[in-house]
Image (spheres, rainbow, N blue to C red):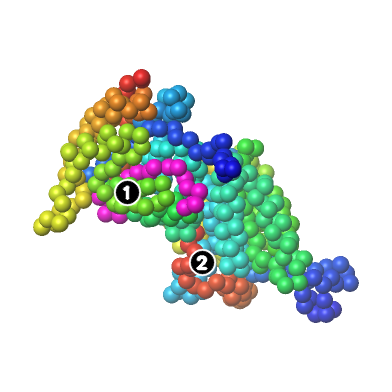
Amino acid sequence: MFRNQYDTDVTTWSPAGRLFQVEYAMEAVKQGSAAIGLRSKTHVVLGCVNKANSELSSHQKKIFKVDDHIGVAIAGLTADGRVLSRYMRNECINYNFTYESPLPVGRLVVQLADKAQVCTQRSWKRPYGVGLLVAGLDESGAHLYYNCPSGNYFEYQAFAIGSRSQAAKTYLERRFENFTDSSRDDLVKDAITAIRETLQGETLKSSICTIAVVGVGEPFHILDQGTVQQIIDTFEIAAEQEGPAAEPDAATGQDTAVEQGAAADQGGSTDEGVAPMDI
Amino acid sequence: MTKQQANWSPYDNNGGSCVAIAGADYCVIAADTRMSTGYNILTREYSKICKLADKCVMASSGFQADVKALQKQLAARHLIYQHQHNKQMSCPAMAQLLSNTLYYKRFFPYYSFNVLGGLDNEGKGCVFTYDAVGSYEKVGYSSQGSGSTLITPFLDNQLKSPSPLLLPAQDAVTPLGEAEAIDLIKTVFASASERDIYTGDKIEIVVVNADGIRREYMELRKD
């Protein structure tokens, strides 16, 4: 109710001690199409749902390679995500140039978080409207972090962000204790299954999801469509044998969420300007 | 009263020679592995050759500290290019980048004499030769470094194409087979190490062709 008085700029506190602009930025993340991440001791898998504005356009790239050992999946304002990916890539290159060794993920996420915090304390700026799932490898193993527009960051065993991510989170919560010792292939299967949960009824095809993997001895790369489709085919067969899970959502509820997801993924349908590296 | 002069120099010459020869579908880049300073040898096993991109290799002689800094710069810029364009840099693109990078330091140059070799976008061999401040030219073969004065005349004798003023126009690319080119390189270095004190120990030969990049070594005189 009183939100409207204290939400004009980011440098105004509300009487309850909240910064509404920051919270609105986190809303933008919830409206973006889903992205998920999960990790084992040696591998991290990122997945995202590809939503295109129309059938005529290409889908937006939401997974970016940052370095051989770091990759990021975004949800929310993809333009902000692209800019932050460019920043992350630059930081990795500069660190490598100076120290001849890869930038530890933990350092990168702190730098990212500090960068986001700046935007919450300048009256002429706005917070970044994008949530980042940062997957990376360092000397202590595989890591998955989530960076908020608020400037906070957390480490996760598995996480999901974006629209209808709760369904994926529920699935991941049931299974996460097994992830540490999962094999790489099982981890990928779990990622695809988690994505399927967010689709809620829609057929799972390799054209509407993107999967990327990074692991010990395996540089970050996005899996090609053919490979993903093969994995989908293998467990679609298994799933049919088990019987489909009950999905109580009405069809109308699903449609509204789709529209919201499409509107928030700004940046236009063409992404020719800065193409991410998906080698 | 005479002007004060510096009693130290930011540069040193670590010696060595580099050669590159372009073929119809391959490119050979070679350099000796001796690193010297003054009349002393620092090491007999230093590589002057650096892979900049999938099909692009650079050999540089001169001041190796500057060479190393230059190689790192180019590698970082190549990564940025890959992020932006989703592909590797072609050899001609890298050639221009190297030229720009060198000229950027026109007033405190990289003491680095470079030859860039690789395959262009069509898979034909190409060699680019540079001076220390970035002036470059695409050629069929080239040599730089302390032994270049001994090597270049020999390569001219074996490989030089007819004058471009003659008609019909002829290709800059040498009509030499890959094995013959490698043989020529070995001969040329063996000769240079006879008289150039800074060239010797070992040659590192890198061959770029459609199958990728491969490396060969050959022993040279150690004196």
Q: Residue at x 57, y 44 (%)?
A: B3
Q: Which residue is mark 2?
A: A60
Measured in 3D between alpha carbons, the distance from the residue under mark 1 to the one under mark 2, in whole angstroms, is 40 Å
Given residues B53 and B193, the one toward you in this image is B193
Q: In the displayed structure, does residue B94 sit left or right of residue A22?
A: left
Would residue B200 be visible to someone looking at this image?
A: yes
Q: Is residue A152 above or below residue A252?
A: above
- 1 or 2: mark nearer the eye: 1
Q: Which quadrant holds the N terminus of chain B?
A: top right
Q: Which residues are drawn in magenta? A: B105-124
Indicate the chain on which mark 1 is placed. Answer: B
Query: What's the magenta bit mostly, secondary-structure-wise?
Result: loop
Q: Quadrant of residue B86?
A: bottom left
Dot 1 falls on a residue whose secondary structure is strand
Q: Which residue is at the front of the view, A191 or B72?
A: B72
Determine if residue A258 is in view: no
- Measured as percent of width and height from the top left, residue A35 is found at 59, 59
Q: Is residue A70 magenta?
A: no
| Chain letter of the residue carrying label 2 | A
Q: Quadrant of the C terminus of chain B?
A: top left
> Residue A175 location, x and y as percent?
65, 48
Q: Residue at x 30, y 40 (%)?
A: B143
Residue B60 coordinates in the image, percent (x, y):
39, 40
- The structure residue drawn at horizontal position 36% and vertical position 26%, both measured from the top left corner, is B197
Indicate the amino acid at tag 1: Phe
Along the viewing direction, whichever of A32 and B220 lies nearer the viewer:
B220
Number of residues whose C-alpha sits closer than 10 Å to that of mark 1, classed few (under 14), some (14–19) or many (20 or more): many
Q: Are marks 1 and 2 on the same chain?
A: no
Q: Which mark is residue B128?
A: 1
Q: Amino acid at mark 2?
A: Gln
Q: Could you tell me which secondary element the residue under label 2 belongs to?
A: loop
For the residue carrying disc 2, how many other residues have a C-alpha within 10 Å: few (<14), some (14-19), or many (20+)? Answer: many
